[in-house]
Image (spheres, rainbow, N blue to C red):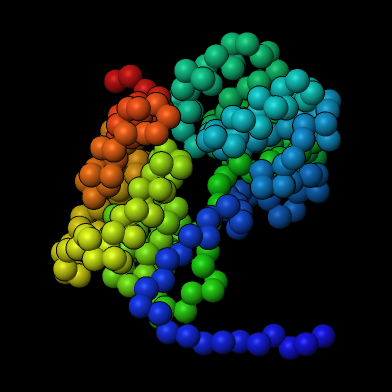
């Protein structure tokens, strides 16, 4: 086998657009490492049939948790959803699912897993004989190919930074970091913004201004319930508007609907918010 041939080149700019759905993020649960029954991350879920007649506990009530729950309800004996905050998880969609399916149950966080198959929740509730625990707990950002001397890092809260508007340090830019956004239009807007900056059509603020903006952004996010680059600043509410840097792009009409893209963004974002 021929040896790999490495070539080193110098570029004016690098755009990282590798996605972030490859490295599963797992919670920390007592006795998790000792549990003898089936555990897996939702990354490895494909079809519901292997879980037929099982009691399945899904850790996480986000998109993957609710989607997989719907998939399993037709075949599993019981499906138990575990949420960080039950009140926040009780969206209209979850409420309808609970009303329609007698074999679906909602619980708070798991406190511990027991050797005999019991799953104990933070409120003292117990699933007596679980067959499978599936972690629908998202993914970690990982850039093992980047050697940038710590200028951009992924911290313990799974936050990538410092990134001005979750996109830029000056000569390195990232597409696809934000979550809780309308894909693919948001990422297309990021790509257009990056192209505009690199081609000289748009200018970034000074490095000092970008760092001040990033520090203020981190402080705002820290006050909310959702950490990380989620664009979800008030607790449990989706964003009402995209960052200002994207607005000139979002004002363009969508080629199919004919509506300005920012109107579609705001409409979709509002679907995840609960009435006050």
Which residue is outermost to the top?
100
Whether residue 237 sits left or right of residue 210 in the image: it is right
The one nearer the camera, 159 or 255, is 255
Above/below status of 53 relative to 230 = above
For the point 63% across and 11% down, which residue is it? 100
Rendered residue at 69%/41% (across/down): 134
Rendering quarter of residue 42: top right
The answer to whether residue 84 is left or right of residue 130 is: left
Task: Count the labels in the image.
Answer: 0
Judging depth in this view, the residue of 211 and 132 nearest the camera is 211
Percent across and percent down for residue 148 are 42, 78
* Residue drawn at 34 percent across, 53 percent down: 192
Residue 252: % across, % down: 29, 38
Residue 76 visible in the shown view: yes
| Closer to the camera in the image, 109 or 162 | 162
Report the quarter where the N terminus lies: bottom right
The quadrant in which the C terminus is found is top left
Res 128 quadrant in image: top right
Q: Is residue 126 in view from this perspective?
A: no
Q: Position of residue 84 (x, y in %)?
A: 49, 37
User: In the picture, residue 179 is in which quadrant?
Assistant: top left
Residue depicted at x 31% and y 55%: 193
Residue 226 percent coordinates (x, y): 39, 43
Q: Nearer the viewer, residue 94 or 188?
A: 188
């Amino acid at each position: 086998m021929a040896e790999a041939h490495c070539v080193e080149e110098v570029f004016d700019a690098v755009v990282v657009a590798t996605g972030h759905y490859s490295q599963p993020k797992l919670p920390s649960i007592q006795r998790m490492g000792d549990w003898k029954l089936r555990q897996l991350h939702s990354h490895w879920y494909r079809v519901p049939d292997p879980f037929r007649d099982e009691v399945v506990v899904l850790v996480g009530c986000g998109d993957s948790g609710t989607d997989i729950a719907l998939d399993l309800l037709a075949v599993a004996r019981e499906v138990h959803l575990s949420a960080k905050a039950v009140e926040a998880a009780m969206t209209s969609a979850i409420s309808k699912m609970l009303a329609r399916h007698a074999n679906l149950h909602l619980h708070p966080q798991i406190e511990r897993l027991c050797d005999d198959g019991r799953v104990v929740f933070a409120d003292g509730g117990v699933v007596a004989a679980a067959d499978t625990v599936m972690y629908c707990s998202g993914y970690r950002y990982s850039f093992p190919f980047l050697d940038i001397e710590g200028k951009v890092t992924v911290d313990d809260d799974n936050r990538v930074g410092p990134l001005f508007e979750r996109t830029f340090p000056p000569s390195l830019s990232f597409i696809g970091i934000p979550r809780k956004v309308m894909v693919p239009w948001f990422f297309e807007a990021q790509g257009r913004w990056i192209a505009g900056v690199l081609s000289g059509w748009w200018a970034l603020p000074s490095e000092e201004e970008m760092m001040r903006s990033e520090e203020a952004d981190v402080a705002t996010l820290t006050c909310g319930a959702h950490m990380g680059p989620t664009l979800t600043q008030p607790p449990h509410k989706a964003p009402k508007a995209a960052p200002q840097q994207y607005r000139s792009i979002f004002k363009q009409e969508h080629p199919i609907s004919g509506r300005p893209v920012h109107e579609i963004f705001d409409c979709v974002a509002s679907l995840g918010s609960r009435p006050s």
